[in-house]
Amino acid sequence: MALEVQWETPYGITCNNAYVIVQDAHIEKKTEDFDDDGTLIERTHFVIRFKVKVWSDLTAYNDKKSFIGGQNFQFELDTDDTDADQFNPIKQCYEHIKTLPGIWEDATDC
């Protein structure tokens, strides 16, 4: 499971077929939340925090070259939608990334 994106390094190098994998993920069960008015309420939900690493392309990844970038994300794990429940949490991470603006909008599964 991975994504392919166009990634620009801090040095201005553009990698058109950058290879992105979820490297690390952590799920935390929470029992409190804030409503729209800022009032603390009891609500059980799960927050997943995860990190992706980016390689210049699949060959660099397979050849165990150094990654060229990375990013941290978090979102509330979807436990209500029956379709989403079929996905494991890592799959939900990939699906979440593809909903984000910028380079992630054009991410493709690979």
Image (spheres, rainbow, N blue to C red):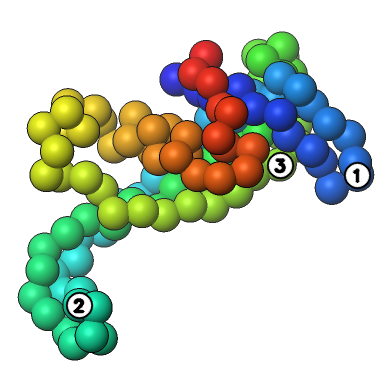
Q: Which residue is mark 1?
A: 11
Q: Which residue is mark 2?
A: 35
Q: Quadrant of residue 90?
A: top left
Kindly identify the residue that appears in the image at 56 percent across and 45 percent down.
101
Return the x and y of residue 98 as percentages of the image width and height: 47, 35
Is residue 64 among what the camera can see? Answer: no
Q: CA distance from mark 1 to mark 3?
A: 11 Å
Q: Which residue is mark 3?
A: 69
What kind of residue is marked 2? Answer: Asp
Kindly identify the residue that appears in the image at 54 percent across and 52 percent down.
72
Q: Would you call the spot at circle 1 few (<14 residues within 10 Å), some (14-19), or many (20 or more)? A: few
Q: Is residue 95 above or below residue 1?
A: below
Question: Between residues 12 and 63, which one lies in front from this camera angle?
Answer: 12
- Contact (Cβ within 8 Å) of mark 1 with mark 3: no
Kindly identify the residue that appears in the image at 44 percent across and 40 percent down.
99
Q: Is residue 103 above or below residue 27?
A: above
Query: Which label was assigned to residue 79?
Result: none
Is residue 44 toward the left or the right of residue 72 in the image?
Answer: left
Is residue 44 toward the left or the right of residue 103 in the image?
Answer: left
Q: CA distance from mark 1 to mark 2?
A: 42 Å
- The disc, 1 or 2, on the residue closer to the chain's N-terminal end is 1
- The disc, 3 or 2, on the residue closer to the chain's N-terminal end is 2
Return the x and y of residue 104 as percentages of the image width and height: 57, 37
Q: Quadrant of residue 89?
A: top left
What kind of residue is marked 3? Answer: Gly
Return the x and y of residue 93 as percentages of the image width and height: 39, 38
Which element carries disc 3, helix, strand or loop?
Answer: strand
Q: Quadrant of residue 44?
A: bottom left
Which element carries disc 1, helix, strand or loop?
Answer: loop
Return the x and y of residue 3 as percentages of the image width and height: 54, 24
What kind of residue is marked 1? Answer: Tyr
